[in-house]
């Protein structure tokens, strides 16, 4: 019986695959052209690295956001030349292209438009060179952020940008979104650490932006490209700067009865003229989620946990540490803990780094909005966020970079409930409006993408956005790269009631 079931399962899968390929080919305007297009893709990267069967494509319709979009095909190149040839082919046939790293993005940036081709960089994951004399590393876009950081540690260096998804996110995706992380307070975001890159434009031409020097004459096209969300081109080789490992590191954890007192501690530390390497906060709901999955010893009645990390010379860290600890105690904590050993620091950071994943213990889904508010208005903005949570009856967990006011409210929900997604999107828009009204910004590090494009008019005039489009058009005049992102157009990629028919838009 078991063998019979296996036989019929294989027959069904074979039939399903043939049916899918038939749909794939006839759904386009010119089925013959679609078949030839697939053959040409296979000729460039190899047949095994072109995906268009349903069981392969479904895993590429997501990133870390709530949006979905089924690509027509996914290709996995292994070199700049293969990327160039794929891009030139898609340009010739009028097929839109989206670059994809690890799929950890939180704004829908890696979601393909219907019928588009995704270029996945999972095979381009080599660290090409570490130049210790010039303190640089040259990598391919698929290199994982933490892998690079760990690799250069043995030379006495570090790669500073550290998104919370550091264990999984790729350097190419970090460049697209100008990713930050807890330590961006002191060291800046990705753009502050990228020196140069090789880029393939929409027509397949290859250009070099920036270089290996700290400064280059002329326009800073490297800086313009970083954070362009994949709409200007695709980086295939990246040179980043490295920093020496600090002589001393000390981490403080303050446990507070509520968010207000934790925000007071943030102001107290900054008020002392101290700029820590990192200054992070998680609220009571996030603490409960963390304790559900990993017991870090947070008190059950904790209203907020504040993490402060100092780095530098031993004497400097010791001296400033005394001021930080005093500022914490002055703000009314229930507990202050200090960690100097690496293992102790890792344990303190485990809650912050693992908070988003831990939210799965509270709800099946979350919608994370990436707003920015002035640091002096954190308390006011978080109260407004709490009011939105109560008004919509939606739990909202807050995990954020308190030092620079970059908030990450996570709206918890179950997408299987009718109308839940629409309600979450509406509530998320209100959270963003609160940040804007306080004098903040739409995004701190996750990008605009699909998630916030319809909110762009809250911040920018039509003239502003037209100027941005003209900059984009100087790189990609036909808008073939990651179309439908950043600028409002009324279209959405939220989970449809019925999946679109698969196929390439040619």
Image (tube, rainbow, N blue to C red):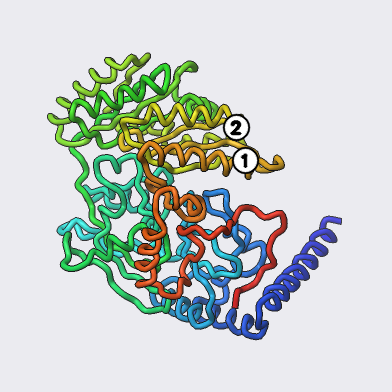
Residue 319 vs 84, above or below: the answer is above
Residue 304 vs 413, above or below: the answer is above
Q: Residue at left 62%, top 80%?
A: 34
Q: Which residue is mark 2?
A: 392
Q: Is residue 463 left or right of residue 479?
A: left
| Rendering quarter of residue 334 | top left
Q: Is residue 436 left or right of residue 75?
A: left
Q: Nearer the viewer, residue 296 or 275?
A: 275
Q: Which residue is mark 1?
A: 423
Residue 334 is at least partly visible in this image: yes
Label 2 secondary element: helix
| Rendering quarter of residue 315 | top left
Q: Which mark is residue 444?
A: none
Q: Tell me where residue 469 appears, x and y as whole percent.
A: 40, 65
- Image quadrant holding the C terminus, namely bottom right
Task: Name the residue furthest left.
Answer: 315
Q: Nearer the viewer, residue 169 or 449?
A: 449
Q: Is residue 11 left or right of residue 114?
A: right
Residue 236 is at least partly visible in this image: no
Q: Is there a contact, CB below 8 Å, between mark 1 and mark 2? A: yes
Q: Residue at left 23%, top 52%?
A: 242
């Amino acid at each position: 019986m078991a063998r019979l079931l296996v036989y019929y399962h294989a027959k069904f899968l074979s039939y399903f695959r043939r049916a899918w390929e038939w749909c794939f080919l006839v759904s386009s305007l010119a089925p013959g052209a679609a078949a030839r297009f697939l053959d040409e893709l296979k000729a460039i990267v190899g047949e095994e690295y072109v995906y268009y069967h349903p069981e392969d494509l479904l895993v590429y319709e997501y990133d870390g956001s709530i949006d979905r979009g089924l690509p027509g095909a996914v290709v996995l190149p292994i070199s700049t030349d293969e990327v160039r040839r794929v891009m030139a082919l898609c340009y010739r046939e009028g097929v839109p292209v989206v670059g994809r790293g690890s799929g950890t993005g939180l704004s829908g940036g890696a979601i393909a438009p219907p019928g588009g081709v995704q270029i996945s960089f999972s095979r381009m994951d080599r660290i090409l060179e570490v130049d210790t004399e010039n303190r640089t590393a040259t990598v391919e876009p698929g290199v994982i952020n933490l892998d690079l950081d760990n690799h250069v540690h043995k030379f006495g260096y570090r790669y500073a940008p550290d998104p919370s998804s550091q264990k999984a996110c790729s350097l190419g995706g970090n460049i697209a979104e100008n990713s930050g992380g807890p330590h961006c307070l002191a060291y800046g975001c990705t753009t502050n650490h990228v020196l140069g890159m090789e880029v393939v434009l929409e027509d397949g031409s290859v250009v070099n932006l920036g270089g290996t020097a700290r400064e280059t004459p002329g326009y800073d096209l490297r800086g313009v490209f970083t954070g362009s969300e994949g709409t200007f081109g695709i980086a295939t080789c990246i040179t980043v700067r490295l920093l020496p490992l600090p002589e001393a590191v000390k981490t403080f954890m303050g446990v507070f009865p509520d968010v207000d007192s934790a925000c007071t501690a943030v102001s107290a530390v900054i008020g002392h003229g101290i700029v820590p390497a990192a200054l992070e906060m998680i609220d009571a709901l996030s603490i409960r989620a963390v304790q559900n999955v990993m017991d870090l010893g947070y008190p059950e009645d904790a209203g907020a946990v504040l993490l402060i990390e100092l780095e530098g010379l031993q004497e400097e860290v010791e001296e400033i540490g005394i001021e930080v600890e005093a500022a914490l105690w002055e703000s009314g904590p229930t507990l202050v803990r200090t960690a100097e050993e690496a293992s102790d620091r890792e344990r303190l950071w485990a809650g912050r780094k693992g908070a988003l994943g831990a939210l799965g213990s509270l709800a099946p889904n979350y919608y994370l909005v990436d707003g920015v508010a002035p640091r002096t208005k954190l308390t006011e903005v978080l109260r407004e966020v709490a009011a939105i949570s109560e008004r919509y009856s939606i739990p909202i967990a807050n995990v954020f970079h308190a030092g620079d006011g970059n908030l990450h409210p996570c709206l918890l929900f179950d997408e299987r409930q009718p109308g839940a997604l629409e309600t979450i999107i509406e509530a998320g828009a209100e959270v963003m409006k609160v940040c804007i009204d306080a004098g903040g910004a739409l995004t701190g590090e996750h990008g605009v993408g699909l998630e916030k494009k319809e909110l762009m008019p809250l911040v920018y005039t039509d003239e502003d956005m037209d100027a941005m489009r003209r900059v984009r058009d100087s790189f990609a005049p036909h808008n073939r790269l990651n179309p439908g992102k950043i600028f409002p157009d009324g279209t959405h990629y939220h989970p449809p009631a019925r999946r679109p028919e698969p196929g390439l838009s040619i």
